[in-house]
Image: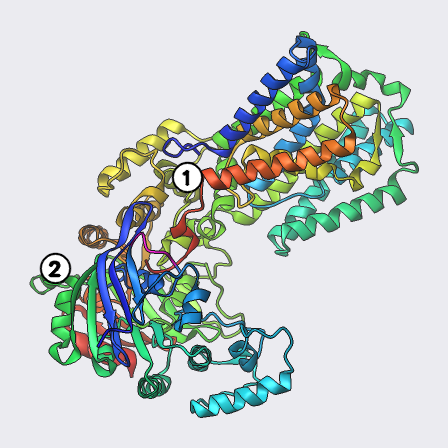
Amino acid sequence: MTPILELRNGTKEYRGVPAVKDVTFALHRGEVHALLGENGAGKSTLTKMIAGVVEPTAGEIWFDGDRAEFKTPAQALSRGIAMVYQETSLVPSLTVAQNIYLTDQKHFHRLRGIYIAGQQFLQSLNFHVDPTALVSGLGAGQKQMVEIARAVHHNAKVIIFDEPTATLTPEEKHQFFSLVERLKTRGVSIIFISHALEEALQISDRITVMRDGEHIVTDVTSAFDREKIVRAMVGRSLSAELYGSRKDRQARSSGDKVLSVQNLSMGNAVRNTSFSVFAGQITGVFGLIGSGRTEAAKVVAGILKRDLFHGGQVRLNGRPVRYRVPRPAVRDGIIYVTEDRKVEGFFETMSIAENIYLAAMAGGRSKSASVSVSEMNALAKEWIGALNVKAINGDARVIELSGGNQQKIVVAKALVQKPKLVIFDEPTRGVDVGAIAEIHQLINRLADDGIAVMVISSYLPEVLQLSDRILVCRQGRIVEEFEGGKADEETIMYAAVH
Amino acid sequence: MLTFGRLSQEQIVFGLAVLLCLGFAVALPGFMTTANILNLVRSVSILGILGVAMGLVVIGRGIDLSLVALMAVSVAWTLNLIASGTSLPQALAIGLAFSLFVGAANGWLVAYVEIPAIFATLAMATLVYGFGQYFLYDLNVVYLPDNARYLLWLGQGNLLGVPVPIVLFAAVCFGGYLFLRYSRSGRYLRAVGDNLAAARTTGVPTRPIIMLQYVLSALIGFVAGIVTAASVASMNTRIAMSTYVYDVILVVVLGGIGLSGGKGGIRNIVVGTLLIGVLLNGMTIMDIQYTIQNVIKGVILLAAIVIDTVVNPRDEQTAQHGDI
């Protein structure tokens, strides 16, 4: 039997840097094919090539026995390849039915007509969504149902799900899985990208693992178990090298209480949470995406504002503080290192030196009102050396560096402000393996120097390896606290999901 | 931006200006004379000064559509005050204070009320124009009073053989250059334009810096207004409702200061101004109709932007956020 969809020797380069290298990938009819890999492994790029979002630099796509070239997502969709994105692509101000029938050919619709059709169609899929409801009022799970309904409406033969379960509640996940089963019986082939290995093992027929843009292994699901997948994902048993050395080190004892948060609330994201951070040790915060950990950290750093009434209390060294903007927090020594460096980490039109110097000025470490170019260059040289940044000199622009080196610049920007409390949010996201070890060393060094360090991560081995104390965040609240050496992956995960 | 041998828009525009210069020099006999070149630069120096004002705002990811209206109204009021007997320094101080106040109001609306700059300044332009007509002066054209004739030197005089407007244009450019490159606030301004969220998180005082953009724009605009009044011995306030402000934006964008903020500097404004100057001067010598001149200006702007897009394509990776 020929596969319904095949990518042969597909390569995609961004500015000469390959995101996917010479990958061959086949999807059989009516199968659920899980695509696994770390961040940056090339899963999204691979599926974007298939769905016509990006064009392959080299390689061929074969669909239903024919050579196919998709220049736009609309072309791919018309052949029956639909992609359901992480961030939904629905129009929030339209109703469910309008969204489903949005790209139909007719120019004028009678709303009543599409509501009736939508009602019948949604019922046939067994989706309990009101076709007249506005999409903006739906929950994440229902939005996903509408996306799927739209894909099915377009007679999709192939549906690509990019991290479909990340934003779903457990019941919604359960619904989603039964939906996948139903789609399968309709003969739809499904590509399923996920970080959650258990889900992949549970619902897929075959599994493909990618690493660093390369195809590692494809096999039937029964041939895999969790460990085998993890080994394929990280390869060279690097995880042991990077994360396994924790056992032989003693947890640091806690110093002074630097930060004390009591009953902090912010909208629906942070709900009445309390925790403390101590000097001279690393406090790890583990939580799934959407658990409110980033929001809580941002409130502490003045980037977001807590609720006006019953917003709780934040104390820095025993002194109550309430920041309206980040500047006074920075001046007090609270530095937040962002999880999304491209959006709020660095200045892309500026050089390394300018980035670091700007942070030094904003942090109040350079008093004069005028810019000293020699001071700026000296600062750049010092930090490039200290953090082992791979750049020719300080004049290189940050945007041209690799992810790991960009992250080091963001870290340098924070450290040049001489912090008392550093909050690292996902410090190694999208960072190459070599740089991960260096950044971890650096974080350890900071704690050894007596600085209070908070590390937020959704990657359990990272939390386990770094932390002297582990806080677990769930649904906007810190729900549990573990001592560094005492917890293992399962107990922490258990606290985070239940 | 010099990236790996690619031509930046600034270089393309500069090349275009040089090419035009050569073309005019060959085709038009009177073009390449010292007198004409000085005349050429003099004729665009006010546009250039306004370009610096607009450029500072655009680098900070804003836009100031009230620039020309504010300039016209504040200078017209100043002239009116002189005519009614106020002493020159006092009248200048009042005009300048009014200008700075409105600039600060613009900045406050954009930074603190968080209204998009394009709406805030557009509304402010209309408000200022109406306010001026009703309260500050009676006629649309306010003439320079005879007791202040010595102000004319600013617009018509020479300093060491160079027309004063050119000297002032150079001085404003130099000041702007020093500000952007060597002052703390200048660096902050660029950071705010490049990435507001990052600047805020880094601890840059973003709101005061946005205020500063509009105050500086008002200040430089006032200088340009005084030079305008001195050049033609009057201030025609109808300029506030003309398309002049779009010419200023043309200079800025043509020179290669991206409307997305953070990019470019004073050099870009000088290059943009020169191209417009060469173009207008050449067309005037060739006696081309004013309406046709507008068409040509528009085509040149589109061409510069198209060439820039072709030569420096948008980076695919930054265009699509998310996991690779």
Quarter of the image where one finds residue B32: top right
Query: In the rendering, at what x and y percent does residue A154 appear?
Result: 45, 77
Q: Is residue A365 left or right of residue B237?
A: left
The residue lying furthest to the front in this view is: A66
Residue assigned mark 1: A350
Above or below A210: residue B118: above
Q: Amino acid at mark 2?
A: Leu
Which residue lies at the image location 64% right of the left edge and 55% below the top edge? B115
Tell me which segment is drawn in magenta: A54-58
Q: Is residue A147 left or right of residue A111?
A: left
Q: Is residue A87 visible?
A: no
Query: In the rendering, at what x and y percent does residue B201 appear?
Result: 44, 52
Q: Which mark is residue A238?
A: 2
Residue A301: within the magenta?
A: no
Secondary structure at numbered mark 1: loop
Q: Is residue B138 left or right of residue B154?
A: right
Task: Give the quadrant of the C terminus of chain A.
Answer: bottom left
Q: Chain of mark 1?
A: A
Q: Which mark is residue A169?
A: none
